[in-house]
Image: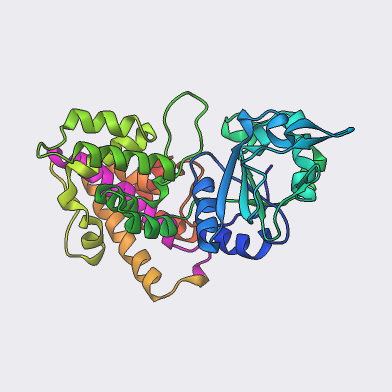
Amino acid sequence: MNLPFNISQNELSDLLLNISVERPVFIWGAPGIGKSALVQKFADDVGLECVSLLGSQLAPEDIIGIPKIDGETSCFMPPKMIAKKEPYVLFLDELNACSQEVQKAFYSLIHERRIGEYHLPEGSVVIGAGNRSQDGAIVKTMSTALINRMFHVQLVANTNQWLDWAYNEGIHPWITDYITQRPDHLFSEPPKTEEPYSTPRSWHMLSDAIKSYSAGDKPISDNILRVLAYGSVSPNHAGQFLAFVKNIGNKNLLSDIIKGEARFPSEPKDRDVLYFVAQSFRSRLLMELPNDKKMLNQNTQQLAHRAKAMIRDLAHINIEIAQMVVSDDDNKSLPEWFMIEIVRDLPRLIAKNR
């Protein structure tokens, strides 16, 4: 499912507080984006126990229970983890990965909050979640009857909100500093090949690995750090993360260049630093420059003015890296009005880029 609008982590928390108490909510999103953690946080915030069921590992009897003879009739005994006396949050994770038979078992649970004669305690909340078909995860077509029983939202990663969470959770400073410099690297779409890719979960995993290796007195070796990075996040992001760590003292270099207090590194030995700073520069322009020039404020107007001078300086040092800053990369383009000014001021750069 692809919904026309997305919500961030904070917006999801607010929506669950307002909607899920009345209607079941289904959260769509890529693997590793934080769906499960946000549901657990919601349960903690409202003071309810969170019971998680993994749809891909369920059989129908895990939901409806097993029959029991009661006198001359029989009844179904629901599973102990579901049949609770106090209200709770029932989280149906990977709901769209379960079989059609299991989906049918969820119908009355989701729509009427009951299993046979057992009713969820008053005040209980039902939340579902699942990956999208384009994510390469195990998904099955969800029946229209099940879709129509839930309110649907699509979650996307928000870098600023994730960083707020990461600082509070003690994520390794190398990770938070890097994502601050490269906010576009927090998440990448799942690849078609079998390789690691970047998500909030994989950066958290890399942080845990680095902290585990850094716990002793012996510093982490360059080779082990390469193994950890390339084993956790997208190969391109891993390479740039390693360059960032190697030059950790230059983490404020881009800000200093924008202020006019420093210059792009120009020595051949600093080529990896130059590439990382240029990539960060492009990312910042993509994030901060508005598509409509009329939306410029004083800060972004100053950034745009300074950016043209910086691109000119960068072209004198390395024309290919300067072209990378203004190129159409991953279908992401700098604002048209800004590119028109670049063409006017730096025709050699654009002509060679084409």
Q: Residue furthest left?
A: 217
Residue for point 45% across, 44% down: 187
Which of the image's four quarters has the N terminus?
A: top right
- On screen, residue 142 versus residue 279, left or right, reads right
Q: Is residue 272 left or right of residue 291?
A: left
Query: Percent from the top left, x then y, of residue 125?
Result: 66, 55
As drawn, the residue found furthest toward the top would be 194
In this rendering, does residue 265 appear at all? Answer: yes
Report x, y in % for residue 273. Answer: 21, 44
The number of discs equals: 0
Q: What stretch is highlighted in magenta?
A: 268-293
Res 320 visible: no
> Residue 57 placed where, x, y %?
61, 29
| Residue 165 among those drawn in magenta | no
Q: Position of residue 131 (x, y in %)?
A: 60, 38
Residue at left 44%, top 62%? 289
